[in-house]
Amino acid sequence: MNDILSEIEAKVRATANVEGFMALGPFGERHGSWELVLWRGAEADSVDRFVSLAFTELPRVWEVEFRVGAEKAVRFARRSVLRLHAESDDLSTDHFEQQIQLGLRRAIEVAKEMTESHLTEVYLEASHAVGKASGHGAAGA
C-alpha cells in the first residue's frame, strides 16, 4: 500500500500546487486511515482552506474520503465532499487515478468557494478543555 500511496501522493501534490495548495506533510496514519492534508493560506481578509484525502481499509474495499475545511481565528467549518470505494487490486489502475484526480479537483473547488460566512463552528477555548471546565484535571482528581 505504501508504494501506491507514494504514487498517489506525488500526483495529488502536483495538482494541489497548481491550485495554490500545499501538502502539510506526507500521508500519515490517523484514526485508522491514511490521510494527506493540503492547505492554502488566507488571502487578503480571507480564510485558511484545507482539503484532506483519507484512505481507509474496510472489509473487501478501500474507502477514499475527500473532506474540506476553512478557518479564521476561532471559527471554522468542515464537511465531507465525496467518497470513493475501490477494491485493493483497483488502487493502482488508471481509472482509479482518474477518479482520485476528479475527486481532488471537486474538493479543491468546494474549498476555494468557502468564505468567512461558512464558518459556523467555534473552537473551544483552552479554559473549556477536558478536565479544566469540570475541575476533574490531574490536580482535582
Image (tube, rainbow, N blue to C red):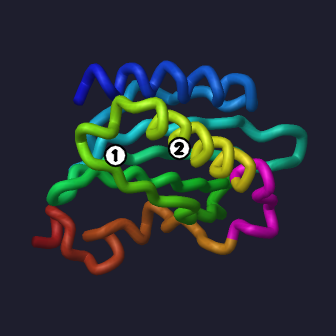
Q: Nearer the viewer, residue 85 or 65?
A: 85
Dot 1 amino acid type: Phe
Quarter of the image with the N terminus in it: top left
The residue under the point 69% across, 36% down is 40
Cα separation, mark 1 vs mark 2, equals 13 Å
Up-down relation of residue 115 to residue 33 (above or below)? below
Residue 28 vs residue 62, the one in the foreground? 62
List x then y, in percent, for residue 21: 67, 31
Report the residue at 35% width, 30% height from top.
Answer: 92
To which residue does mark 1 refer?
55
Please state the extent of the stretch shown in magenta in the rendering: 111-119
Q: Is residue 98 left or right of residue 107?
A: left
Q: Which residue is mark 2?
A: 99
Q: Residue 18's spot in the image, x, y percent?
A: 73, 24
Q: Residues within 10 Å of mark 2 (few under 14, many from 20)?
A: few
**Label 1 or label 2, whichever comes before in sequence order:** 1
Mark 1 Cα within 10 Å, few/some/many (few <14, many 20+)? Answer: many
Q: Nearer the viewer, residue 1 or 36?
A: 1
Residue 24: mark: none
Residue at horizontal 45 percent and vertical 26 percent from the top = 9
Residue 108 appears left or right of 101: right
The residue under the point 51% across, 52% down is: 66
Please state which of the two labelled residues, at mark 1 or mark 2, is closer to the viewer: 2
Q: Is residue 126 above or below residue 9?
A: below
Residue 15 x, y percent position in the rendering: 64, 27
Image quarter of residue 140: bottom left
Vertical placement of residue 17 versus 49, above or below: above
